[in-house]
Amino acid sequence: MIDSILLVDDEDLFHLVFEDACSLLDITLSLQSVSSADEAEKMFKEWYESNKADERPECVFVDLNIIGSSFDGIELVRRINFEYGNHVIIGIISSSDEPEEQAKAVKAGAQFWIVKSDEIEPRLEEFRKDFDKYKNGKTSFKVYK
Amino acid sequence: MLSFDKKTIEQLLKLYETRKIGLEGNITKLIQTDNEDFKKYLDTCIENDNENRRKRLTITKQVQSQNTELTKAKEENERINEELKIALSQTLEAKEIAEKDLDLLQKKTQFELIGLIIKISLSIIIGVGLITTGIYLYIITIGGDTKIIESSWSNMFGILLTNSFSIIGTIMGVKYASDKIDKK
């Protein structure tokens, strides 16, 4: 089971879907959801500046296009990885399956890409199985679709 | 992990037995106990919670799907509205052009008619002038009485000059207006 997850997604309905799917699949018991990239960045900045790396979530799922934010999901991944000290397993969760966007995400340091659809549970289940490999750095960028 | 004392467990069990109110959420997965009844209670709570989550997940997905369809329909409506606005604007422009053309055509026809009337009038005046002059010259040549024809010719010539300038002025005006319409 993943210790804690942070979901960054502008769609409130997806927060509910993700929370229920995570609970039913026993993916995590600790899930925090935020609706904007700015909010997530602020959290990581605080953790970074106050040296509270242990308060960070173990894994972060970031939506690609976060409406109402001043930058997109890939930029958030880049900032977390290169400006706020990393320390998390981070990837994109999006309805898009564009290889160009995925290449950008890899450059920004994303470790996975989950394609959103009505059937999100099997993808999350697969991700859960791979999670230890991500933790140990034994797997490269993977797309779940 | 969490553990509860005997009294709390009894209270929780009684609450569930009497009012069917049980623990909910992920906290139920964090409680440890050796009490068999409480274990069963926790299993029931977890099962109820999972059932509720399954129902909510299904409904949320349906709402999400309907929202997506509504968003697409809204986008399609906006696209059609935009197309209609463009079509309406084009139709209004075409209508304005057609009205202008019709107006010009009517004016042109009117000018042509006026020009024709003036030309005919001028021809009649010149014709009458020529005939009167001809008769006057003829009478002079044959040595007849020229008194009546003289005054007639003089009157005619006066009228001819006055009207001719007026008619020529009108013709120039009509010509100028016609040229302007042609240029347009």
Image (cartoon, rainbow, N blue to C red):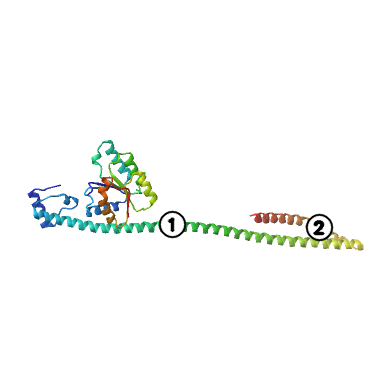
Left-right relation of B96 to A60: right
Q: What label does residue B110 carry, if any? A: none
Task: Residue A38: give x, y in percent of width and height.
Answer: 33, 43
**Looking at the rendering, which quadrant does residue B109 occupy?**
bottom right
Element at label 2: helix
Mark whose residue sits in front, 1 or 2: 1
Left-right relation of B96 to B174: left
Total marks in image: 2
Q: Please name the amino acid that badge 2 sits on.
A: Phe
Q: Quadrant of the C terminus of chain A?
A: bottom left
Left-right relation of B61 to B156: left
Answer few, some or many: residues within 10 Å of disc 2's Cα (few below 14, many 20 plus, some between 14 and 19).
some
Same chain under badges 1 and 2? The reply is: yes
Establish if B121 lies above or below A2. Answer: below
Task: Residue A109: give x, y in percent of width and height.
Answer: 33, 44
Q: Could you say which is closer to the camera, residue A108 or residue B170? A: A108
Task: Residue B169: give x, y in percent of width and height.
Answer: 72, 54
Q: Residue furthest top?
A: A50
Q: Could you say which is closer to the camera, residue B157 or residue A43? A: A43
* Visible residue check, residue B64: yes
Answer few, some or many: residues within 10 Å of disc 1's Cα (few below 14, many 20 plus, some between 14 and 19).
few
Q: Which residue is mark 1?
A: B79
Nearest to N terminus: mark 1 or mark 2: 1
* Visible residue check, residue B148: no
Chain letter behind tag 2: B
Q: Please name the amino acid that badge 1 sits on.
A: Arg
Q: Residue furthest front?
A: A138
Q: What label does residue B157 carry, if any? A: 2
The residue shown at (52%, 57%) is B90
